[in-house]
Amino acid sequence: PWPLVWTGLHGKRLALLASEPLSESAPSTAPGTISRVEPDAIVVATGRGAIRVTRVQVEGRPAMFVRDSLNGHPTTPGDRFESTATFT
């Protein structure tokens, strides 16, 4: 997304730096819920379908590809992004 999007996951502030829309039908899960974890991306439900996130940045850390982030920050389907309002 551009401009980038700030969100939270597992109590850490996170920037979504690269993603692409998917042509999937709207999932039955709430927007912001991780519906699938792939080796190099996470798929997140939106209000109109889903996006495939491929690059992220944890606040205060360097940007990285999701495949590298998953090594240090395990993420599973059903995890949900948090509002950044909880970080202020």
Image: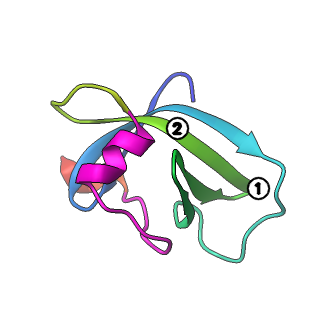
Quadrant containing the N terminus is: top right
Q: Earlier in the sequence, mark 2 or mark 1?
A: 1
Which residue lies at the image location 84% right of the left edge and 63% below the top edge? 25
Position of residue 22 relative to residue 26, above or below, is above
Name the residue type under label 2.
Answer: Thr
Of residues 34 and 69, which is closer to you in this image?
69
What's the CA distance linking mark 2 and mark 1? 19 Å
Of residues 34 and 68, which is closer to you in this image?
68
**What label does residue 54 carry, if any?**
2
Across and down, in percent, residue 68 comes to 35, 41
**What label does residue 30 carry, if any?**
none
Of residues 16 and 87, which is closer to you in this image?
16
Position of residue 20 relative to residue 3, above or below, is below
Across and down, in percent, residue 65 comes to 42, 34
Q: Which residue is mark 1?
A: 48
Across and down, in percent, residue 6 comes to 38, 38
Name the residue type under label 1.
Answer: Arg
Question: Which type of secondary structure does the marked residue at label 1 adopt?
Answer: loop
Q: Nearer the viewer, mark 2 or mark 1?
A: 2
Which residue lies at the image location 59% right of the left edge and 55% below the top edge? 43
The region drawn magenta spans: 65-82
Position of 19 with respect to 13 (left or right) is right
Q: For mark 2, does the 10 Å Cα neighbourhood hold few (<14), some (14 to 19), or many (20 or more) residues?
A: many
Which colour assignment does the render follow?
rainbow
